[in-house]
Image (cartoon, rainbow, N blue to C red):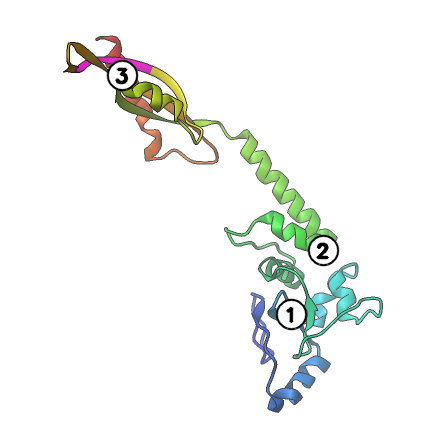
Amino acid sequence: MAENGSETSGPVHRRCLAHPAGENNHTSRVGSSKWIRLNVGGTCFLTTRQTLCRDPKSFLYRLSQADPELDSDKDDTGAYLIDRDPTYFGPVLNYLRHGKLVLNRDLAEEGVLEEAEFYNIPSLIKLLKDSIRERDCRTSQAPVKHVYRVLQCQEEELTQMVSTMSDGWKFEQLVSIGSSYNYGNEDQAEFLCVVSKELHNQSYGPNSEPSEKAKILQERGSRM
């Protein structure tokens, strides 16, 4: 939606700036019409009074009706000042426009839920809670997958390597592959160390293939 009165599916927002003196008449016309400006966290949204009145229980309904019990300040452009995150307000405003929950992939549902609760929109709150519950249920039922790695090391490096494993890696098996070189009169043994790590919410990919390699190397070590 642009400020010329045409409406699109996405929220109109821009950085709020004071209008020059020559634009005061335009601002007055917008303020007195069906259009309402909202300054959410420094970003301006332009929407209709009808959109904000979709849920009579919401904070935005009361704001659009100039509820005298609301202490509502305005900026220099006449936009209502709301100290909230504009990133999460977009989906809330779009929901009031068309009744559907549309989220970008990188937008957390929990963040939009916080805004829905602040603006007191019960139908959107229920929709988000159901969506979060379904997402968490799918996550908990997903099978645990593992990725394996096989690390080659010498005897003198073994203790340090195992003790410094981090980021969820666990020791699985140690396979001796014989002596690699002589140091003085002593043979230095060489080992293959098999380690594993759980993968959560990830599909199988190239990193999961080494599990077969680990099995082959384990068989090789057992025959030596």
Q: Quadrant of residue 140?
A: top right
Amino acid type for the residue under numbered disc 3: Glu
**Which residue is at 68% across, 54% downward?**
116
Left or right? Give the position of 40 relative to 58.
left
Question: CB of mark 3 within 8 Å of CB of mark 1?
Answer: no
**Which residue is at 76% across, 68% downward?**
63
Residue 216 seen from this side? no
When the figure is inspected, residue 56 is found, relative to residue 175, above or below; the finding is: below
Q: Nearer the viewer, mark 3 or mark 1?
A: 3
Packing grade of label 2 (10 A; few <14, some 14-19, many >=20) is few
Q: Quadrant of the N terminus?
A: bottom right
Task: Name the residue that disc number 3 marks.
Answer: 155
- Res 142 label: none
Image coords of residue 71 (percent x, y): 79, 68
Does the magenta-highlighted stretch encompass residue 180?
Answer: yes
Q: Which residues are magenta?
A: 174-181
The Cα–Cα distance between marks 1 and 2, rounded to whole angstroms, is 16 Å
Q: Could you tell me which secondary element the residue under label 2 belongs to?
A: helix
- Res 39 label: 1
Q: Could you tell me which secondary element the residue under label 1 belongs to?
A: strand
When the figure is inspected, residue 195 is found, relative to residue 80, above or below; the finding is: above
Amino acid type for the residue under numbered disc 1: Asn
Of pointers 1 and 2, the one earlier in the residue sequence: 1
Task: Name the residue that disc number 2 marks.
Answer: 118
The Cα–Cα distance between marks 2 and 3, rounded to whole angstroms, is 61 Å
